[in-house]
Image: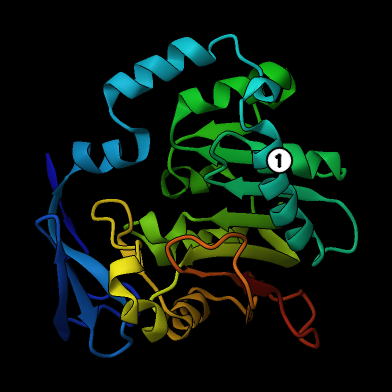
Amino acid sequence: MSVELFPEGCPVCEKSTSTQHHCEMDGHNYIQCKSCELIYQSGSSDIDTMTACCTGGPIKRLRRQLINRFRRIEDQRDFDLRMSRARKIVDFATSYATQPGVYLDVGCNKGFNLYAAEEKGWDVYGNELIEEILLPIKNSKPYLREKIKVGSFVDLAETYSDNFFDLITCIDVIGHLTRPQYAMEQMIRILKPGGVVVYQTCDATPDKMALFAKWNALKPNEHLLLYNQENFKIQALNAGFAKIEFAPEPFEVCDGILRPLAGKRLNSSLDKGRTCVVR
Protein backbone atom coordinates (compact mmCIF):
# COMPACT_ATOMS: atom_id res chain seq x y z
CA MET A 1 0.00 0.00 0.00
CA SER A 2 1.37 3.42 -0.95
CA VAL A 3 0.75 6.88 0.49
CA GLU A 4 1.16 10.30 -1.11
CA LEU A 5 3.54 12.45 0.93
CA PHE A 6 2.41 16.02 1.59
CA PRO A 7 -0.15 16.13 -1.27
CA GLU A 8 -1.39 19.58 -0.21
CA GLY A 9 2.04 21.20 -0.49
CA CYS A 10 4.57 22.57 1.96
CA PRO A 11 3.69 21.52 5.53
CA VAL A 12 5.30 24.67 6.96
CA CYS A 13 4.06 27.72 5.06
CA GLU A 14 0.35 27.03 4.78
CA LYS A 15 0.53 24.39 2.08
CA SER A 16 2.36 26.45 -0.54
CA THR A 17 2.74 24.46 -3.76
CA SER A 18 5.44 26.72 -5.24
CA THR A 19 8.43 24.39 -5.17
CA GLN A 20 11.63 23.51 -6.98
CA HIS A 21 13.47 20.24 -7.39
CA HIS A 22 16.18 19.80 -4.78
CA CYS A 23 17.65 16.38 -5.51
CA GLU A 24 16.92 12.73 -6.18
CA MET A 25 18.13 10.10 -3.74
CA ASP A 26 17.69 6.35 -4.25
CA GLY A 27 14.89 6.96 -6.73
CA HIS A 28 12.99 9.35 -4.45
CA ASN A 29 12.57 13.09 -4.96
CA TYR A 30 13.22 15.85 -2.48
CA ILE A 31 11.72 19.23 -3.33
CA GLN A 32 12.21 22.64 -1.75
CA CYS A 33 9.52 25.19 -0.97
CA LYS A 34 10.34 28.47 -2.73
CA SER A 35 8.73 30.42 0.09
CA CYS A 36 10.17 28.99 3.34
CA GLU A 37 12.96 26.81 1.83
CA LEU A 38 11.84 23.66 3.63
CA ILE A 39 13.21 20.56 1.91
CA TYR A 40 10.82 17.62 1.97
CA GLN A 41 10.25 14.31 0.26
CA SER A 42 7.57 14.33 -2.41
CA GLY A 43 5.61 11.78 -4.36
CA SER A 44 4.25 8.45 -3.20
CA SER A 45 5.96 5.90 -1.00
CA ASP A 46 5.20 2.40 0.16
CA ILE A 47 4.00 2.28 3.77
CA ASP A 48 5.76 -1.01 4.50
CA THR A 49 9.02 0.42 3.17
CA MET A 50 8.67 3.53 5.33
CA THR A 51 7.93 1.40 8.38
CA ALA A 52 10.91 -0.86 7.66
CA CYS A 53 13.20 2.21 7.65
CA CYS A 54 12.32 2.64 11.32
CA THR A 55 11.97 -0.98 12.39
CA GLY A 56 14.67 -2.65 10.27
CA GLY A 57 12.15 -5.06 8.71
CA PRO A 58 10.43 -8.27 9.92
CA ILE A 59 13.55 -10.43 10.32
CA LYS A 60 15.32 -7.86 12.45
CA ARG A 61 12.17 -7.34 14.49
CA LEU A 62 11.83 -11.08 15.17
CA ARG A 63 15.47 -11.29 16.21
CA ARG A 64 15.01 -8.39 18.65
CA GLN A 65 11.85 -9.96 20.06
CA LEU A 66 13.70 -13.19 20.82
CA ILE A 67 16.80 -11.50 22.25
CA ASN A 68 15.02 -8.80 24.26
CA ARG A 69 12.38 -11.00 25.80
CA PHE A 70 14.41 -11.57 28.96
CA ARG A 71 17.08 -8.87 28.63
CA ARG A 72 17.32 -5.93 31.02
CA ILE A 73 18.31 -2.47 29.82
CA GLU A 74 21.49 -2.62 31.93
CA ASP A 75 22.58 -5.66 29.89
CA GLN A 76 22.91 -3.62 26.68
CA ARG A 77 26.50 -3.78 25.43
CA ASP A 78 26.63 -0.02 24.92
CA PHE A 79 24.72 0.82 28.11
CA ASP A 80 27.33 3.22 29.50
CA LEU A 81 27.72 5.03 26.18
CA ARG A 82 23.96 5.33 25.68
CA MET A 83 23.48 6.56 29.23
CA SER A 84 26.18 9.18 28.75
CA ARG A 85 24.28 10.57 25.75
CA ALA A 86 20.95 10.33 27.57
CA ARG A 87 22.25 12.18 30.62
CA LYS A 88 23.56 14.93 28.34
CA ILE A 89 20.11 15.31 26.77
CA VAL A 90 18.27 15.17 30.07
CA ASP A 91 20.67 17.55 31.83
CA PHE A 92 20.15 20.09 29.06
CA ALA A 93 16.36 19.68 28.99
CA THR A 94 15.91 19.79 32.75
CA SER A 95 18.05 22.92 33.03
CA TYR A 96 14.89 24.74 31.86
CA ALA A 97 12.89 23.40 34.81
CA THR A 98 13.01 24.65 38.39
CA GLN A 99 12.31 21.23 39.87
CA PRO A 100 11.50 17.67 38.75
CA GLY A 101 8.01 17.17 37.40
CA VAL A 102 6.27 15.05 34.74
CA TYR A 103 8.36 14.21 31.67
CA LEU A 104 7.47 12.74 28.26
CA ASP A 105 10.02 11.46 25.75
CA VAL A 106 8.43 11.35 22.29
CA GLY A 107 10.03 8.52 20.33
CA CYS A 108 11.78 7.22 23.42
CA ASN A 109 13.60 4.45 21.54
CA LYS A 110 15.10 2.00 24.07
CA GLY A 111 14.26 4.24 27.02
CA PHE A 112 17.65 5.62 27.99
CA ASN A 113 16.33 9.19 28.31
CA LEU A 114 13.58 7.90 30.61
CA TYR A 115 16.17 6.07 32.69
CA ALA A 116 18.30 9.23 32.96
CA ALA A 117 15.34 11.48 33.80
CA GLU A 118 14.16 9.10 36.49
CA GLU A 119 17.62 9.27 38.04
CA LYS A 120 17.01 13.01 38.47
CA GLY A 121 13.64 12.47 40.16
CA TRP A 122 11.27 12.98 37.22
CA ASP A 123 7.99 11.11 36.77
CA VAL A 124 8.63 9.62 33.33
CA TYR A 125 6.41 8.69 30.38
CA GLY A 126 7.29 7.69 26.84
CA ASN A 127 6.01 6.54 23.50
CA GLU A 128 7.81 4.49 20.87
CA LEU A 129 6.89 3.04 17.49
CA ILE A 130 8.95 -0.18 17.81
CA GLU A 131 7.53 -2.30 20.60
CA GLU A 132 10.27 -4.90 20.99
CA ILE A 133 13.07 -2.41 21.70
CA LEU A 134 11.17 -1.39 24.84
CA LEU A 135 11.29 -4.87 26.37
CA PRO A 136 14.62 -4.40 28.24
CA ILE A 137 13.58 -1.22 30.06
CA LYS A 138 10.20 -2.74 30.87
CA ASN A 139 11.98 -5.80 32.28
CA SER A 140 14.22 -3.58 34.41
CA LYS A 141 11.38 -1.26 35.46
CA PRO A 142 8.08 -3.17 35.28
CA TYR A 143 6.12 -0.20 36.62
CA LEU A 144 6.86 1.66 33.37
CA ARG A 145 4.87 -0.85 31.31
CA GLU A 146 1.72 1.26 31.62
CA LYS A 147 3.56 4.56 31.18
CA ILE A 148 5.24 3.82 27.83
CA LYS A 149 2.79 3.71 24.93
CA VAL A 150 3.53 1.89 21.68
CA GLY A 151 2.82 3.70 18.42
CA SER A 152 3.41 6.97 16.62
CA PHE A 153 2.93 10.11 18.70
CA VAL A 154 0.60 11.44 15.98
CA ASP A 155 -1.71 8.48 16.57
CA LEU A 156 -1.35 8.51 20.36
CA ALA A 157 -1.45 12.25 21.05
CA GLU A 158 -5.15 12.43 21.86
CA THR A 159 -4.74 9.81 24.59
CA TYR A 160 -2.71 12.27 26.67
CA SER A 161 -4.46 14.77 28.96
CA ASP A 162 -4.31 18.54 28.57
CA ASN A 163 -1.66 20.42 30.56
CA PHE A 164 -0.11 17.25 31.95
CA PHE A 165 3.64 17.39 31.22
CA ASP A 166 6.22 19.84 32.53
CA LEU A 167 8.84 18.80 30.00
CA ILE A 168 8.85 17.01 26.63
CA THR A 169 11.79 15.89 24.53
CA CYS A 170 11.42 15.02 20.86
CA ILE A 171 14.84 13.89 19.71
CA ASP A 172 15.27 13.03 16.02
CA VAL A 173 11.53 12.47 15.53
CA ILE A 174 9.78 15.56 14.12
CA GLY A 175 11.47 15.23 10.70
CA HIS A 176 10.03 11.71 10.30
CA LEU A 177 6.38 12.77 10.61
CA THR A 178 3.85 13.38 7.84
CA ARG A 179 1.88 15.72 10.16
CA PRO A 180 4.54 17.76 11.96
CA GLN A 181 2.42 20.80 12.81
CA TYR A 182 -0.34 18.63 14.26
CA ALA A 183 2.30 16.90 16.41
CA MET A 184 3.58 20.26 17.66
CA GLU A 185 0.04 21.47 18.37
CA GLN A 186 -0.64 18.35 20.41
CA MET A 187 2.60 18.80 22.36
CA ILE A 188 1.47 22.31 23.24
CA ARG A 189 -1.91 21.00 24.36
CA ILE A 190 -0.47 18.38 26.72
CA LEU A 191 2.27 20.68 28.02
CA LYS A 192 1.65 22.57 31.26
CA PRO A 193 1.75 26.38 31.20
CA GLY A 194 5.40 27.38 31.34
CA GLY A 195 6.48 23.96 30.08
CA VAL A 196 9.22 23.31 27.56
CA VAL A 197 9.74 21.04 24.54
CA VAL A 198 13.29 20.22 23.41
CA TYR A 199 13.64 19.11 19.80
CA GLN A 200 16.55 17.80 17.79
CA THR A 201 16.30 17.39 14.03
CA CYS A 202 18.38 17.49 10.85
CA ASP A 203 19.76 20.89 9.84
CA ALA A 204 19.39 22.03 6.21
CA THR A 205 21.22 25.34 6.55
CA PRO A 206 23.32 26.33 3.50
CA ASP A 207 26.66 25.49 5.11
CA LYS A 208 25.50 21.92 5.79
CA MET A 209 24.08 21.55 2.30
CA ALA A 210 27.33 22.82 0.77
CA LEU A 211 28.97 19.69 2.18
CA PHE A 212 26.56 17.56 0.15
CA ALA A 213 28.82 14.51 -0.04
CA LYS A 214 29.15 14.47 3.76
CA TRP A 215 25.61 15.56 4.56
CA ASN A 216 23.94 12.31 5.55
CA ALA A 217 20.51 13.73 6.28
CA LEU A 218 19.09 12.69 2.90
CA LYS A 219 17.46 9.39 3.87
CA PRO A 220 14.30 8.81 1.81
CA ASN A 221 11.28 7.34 3.62
CA GLU A 222 12.99 8.14 6.94
CA HIS A 223 13.91 11.85 6.93
CA LEU A 224 10.83 13.31 5.28
CA LEU A 225 11.41 16.92 6.40
CA LEU A 226 14.71 18.80 6.44
CA TYR A 227 14.42 22.09 8.31
CA ASN A 228 16.63 25.11 8.71
CA GLN A 229 16.31 27.50 11.66
CA GLU A 230 13.95 29.91 9.90
CA ASN A 231 11.39 27.41 8.65
CA PHE A 232 11.49 25.45 11.89
CA LYS A 233 10.69 28.67 13.72
CA ILE A 234 7.80 29.36 11.32
CA GLN A 235 6.41 25.86 11.95
CA ALA A 236 6.70 26.19 15.73
CA LEU A 237 5.09 29.64 15.79
CA ASN A 238 2.28 28.50 13.49
CA ALA A 239 1.66 25.59 15.83
CA GLY A 240 1.28 28.03 18.72
CA PHE A 241 4.57 28.03 20.59
CA ALA A 242 5.28 31.35 22.26
CA LYS A 243 9.06 31.37 22.20
CA ILE A 244 11.71 29.51 20.22
CA GLU A 245 15.39 29.30 21.03
CA PHE A 246 18.20 27.52 19.20
CA ALA A 247 20.98 25.89 21.19
CA PRO A 248 24.46 26.51 19.76
CA GLU A 249 25.51 22.85 19.56
CA PRO A 250 23.74 19.54 18.91
CA PHE A 251 23.84 16.65 21.36
CA GLU A 252 26.02 14.82 18.86
CA VAL A 253 27.49 15.56 15.46
CA CYS A 254 25.38 13.48 13.07
CA ASP A 255 23.60 14.37 9.83
CA GLY A 256 23.90 18.09 10.58
CA ILE A 257 21.55 18.87 13.44
CA LEU A 258 19.33 21.64 14.77
CA ARG A 259 18.51 21.74 18.46
CA PRO A 260 15.41 23.91 19.06
CA LEU A 261 13.49 24.49 22.27
CA ALA A 262 9.83 25.59 22.17
CA GLY A 263 7.55 26.75 24.94
CA LYS A 264 3.89 27.24 25.75
CA ARG A 265 2.37 30.40 27.15
CA LEU A 266 1.78 30.70 30.85
CA ASN A 267 -1.77 31.27 32.05
CA SER A 268 -1.15 34.92 32.87
CA SER A 269 -1.17 37.33 29.94
CA LEU A 270 1.76 39.08 31.60
CA ASP A 271 3.99 36.02 31.31
CA LYS A 272 6.49 35.84 28.49
CA GLY A 273 5.45 32.37 27.32
CA ARG A 274 6.47 28.74 27.16
CA THR A 275 9.69 28.05 25.33
CA CYS A 276 10.73 25.71 22.51
CA VAL A 277 14.42 24.85 22.35
CA VAL A 278 15.96 23.33 19.23
CA ARG A 279 19.22 21.54 19.79
Residue plotted at (62% across, 25% down): 76
What colour scheme was applied to this rendering of the protein?
rainbow
Question: Residue 43's x, y, as percent?
Answer: 11, 61
Q: Can the viewer see residue 123?
A: no
For this rendering, which residue is in front, 29 or 77? Answer: 77
Q: Is 194 left, or right, of 36 in this rendering?
A: right
Can residue 16 be seen in the rendering of this structure?
A: yes
Which quadrant would the C terminus be assigned to in this image?
A: bottom right
Q: Residue at x 23, y 79 (%)?
A: 32
Q: Residue at x 47, y 26 (%)?
A: 131
- Relative to 115, say whether 219 is above or below: below
223 versus 243 height, above or below: above
**Closest to the observer, 208 or 189:** 208
Q: 10 Å neighbourhood of mark 1: few (<14), some, or many (≥20)?
A: some
Q: Residue furthest right?
A: 99
Near-viewer residue (133 or 74): 74
Q: Position of residue 219 (x, y in %)?
A: 28, 56
Secondary element at image label 1: helix
> What's the residue type where badge 1 is placed?
Met
Residue labelled with disc 1? 83
- Quarter of the figure with the N terminus: top left
Q: Is residue 215 left or right of residue 18?
A: right
Please identify the quarter of the rendering in which residue 139 is found: top right
- When the figure is inspected, residue 16 is found, relative to residue 148, above or below; the finding is below
Residue 236 in the figure: left or right of residue 141: left
Residue 84 placement (x, y as % from top left): 72, 46
16 versus 184 height, above or below: below
**Residue 29 percent across, percent down from the top left:** 14, 65
Q: At x 16% / y 86%, what residue is drawn?
A: 18
- Relative to the observer, which residue lies in front, 37 or 219? 219
